[in-house]
Image (cartoon, grey):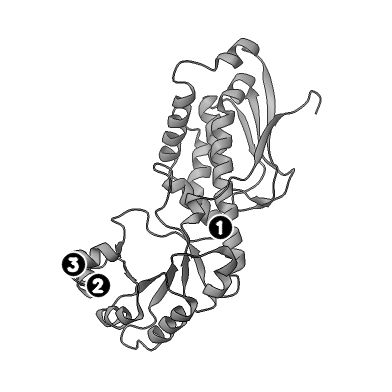
Amino acid sequence: MSSLSPDVAKALTDGGLDPEYVASVIMMALDEDLADGPDVTTEATVPADATDIADFTARQSGVAAGVPVAAAVFDLVSQGTAKIRQAVKDGDRVEPGTVLLTVTGSTRDLLTGERTALNLLCHMSGIATQTRLWVDAVEGTGAKIRDTRKTTPGLRALQKYAVRCGGGVNHRMSLSDAGLVKDNHVVAAGGVVEAFEAVRKAHPGLPIEVEIDSLEQLPGVLAAGAELILLDNFTPERMRAAVQVTGRNELYGRTRLEASGGLTLDLARAVAETGVDYLSVGALTHSAPILDVGSDFREEGK
């Protein structure tokens, strides 16, 4: 039950997701539900040859994400026999009553996979919806909304994918695809410039971001050649000053700046209007509410 159909795998790949990874997440979830055997309630009440049509319908306004992932759940549960129609694309805005996904197949398969599909679809759509609120709040400023590594273990790729569906951009995926010099690295290395140069020397060519917590640290990291600087808990006034300083950095050109720490949606536009390039928002993944999506069997004759 772990091999995806080619068309389902392609839909995941087209969205930038690894089908094998998605299948592994789904199988882990299904293993929790089926750890002691099949769904006893469904097995006792539903004939083995029964079939039904299930519609997965939004009950709130928001942004869809994870529709191909939910489709993959039923593809795996049914071993490729379910007929699946994805009614919307990930990233589409949806309203209450919008059908996201329709699955036709064995009633037992539909009931067995229903909760896993909903858990993933509601969670990912919730992240996309939350991200879109931030993206809309800063529209026209040039600033982008960026996620963090504050993700649920094992679900990082799905959560960061959902951020992209909502119009956000991703920070690094792992601890090795980019460097990020933070305060504890600074203490260990003996200074912010020293820490930056140590990472650059050890990993030449790797993208490196440097966190600073004062304007006094800015000239040194600019002179050292930092191309991306994280402004930790800066006020909007200090962000504007940082933007002005980096704009005069003729040696290395326009260094990108990322605002981080204490950001809230109601202040997002004011922060973006300071001229920073990114707003780093951990809440996109660590505390986004779900988007309510329901699963209902069609009544006979419909």
Give the crowd class for mark 1: few <14, some 14-19, many >=20 residues within 10 Å: many
Give how far apart the Cα atoms at labels 1 and 2 are.
Answer: 31 Å
Which amino acid type corresponds to the residue marked 1 in the rendered image? Answer: Thr
Of labels 1 and 2, the one closer to you: 2
> Which mark, by number, is residue 131?
1
Residue 274, given in percent of the width and then of the height, sits at: 51, 79
Residue drawn at x 59%, y 45% as measured from the top left: 290
Residue 40, quarter of the rendered image: top right
Residue drawn at x 43%, y 82% as measured from the top left: 243
Q: Horizontally, is 244 left or right of 175 in the view? A: right
Asked whether the viewer can see residue 47, the reply is no
Q: Horizontally, is 172 left or right of 268 in the view? A: left
Tell me which label, 1 or 2, sits earlier in the chain.
Answer: 1
Give how far apart the Cα atoms at labels 3 and 1 are.
Answer: 35 Å
Residue 82, given in percent of the width and then of the height, sits at: 60, 27
The residue nearer to you, when weighing 273 against 39, is 273
The residue that mark 2 highlights is 192
Which amino acid type corresponds to the residue marked 2 in the rendered image? Answer: Val
Report helix, strand or loop for mark 3.
helix
Question: Eyeballing the image, is 283 above or below 300?
Answer: below
Q: Quadrant of the C terminus?
A: top right
Which amino acid type corresponds to the residue marked 3 in the rendered image? Answer: Ala
Report helix, strand or loop for mark 1.
helix
Of labels 3 and 1, the one closer to you: 3
> Which mark, by number, is residue 189?
3
Residue 230, given in percent of the width and then of the height, sits at: 38, 70
Asked if the residue under mark 1 is in contact with the one under mark 3, i.e. CB atoms within 8 Å, the reply is no
Asked whether the viewer can see residue 226, the reply is yes
Give how far apart the Cα atoms at labels 3 and 2 are.
Answer: 8 Å
Residue 1, given in percent of the width and then of the height, sits at: 46, 25
Tell me which label, 3 or 1, sits earlier in the chain.
Answer: 1
Q: Horizontally, is 182 left or right of 262 in the view? A: left
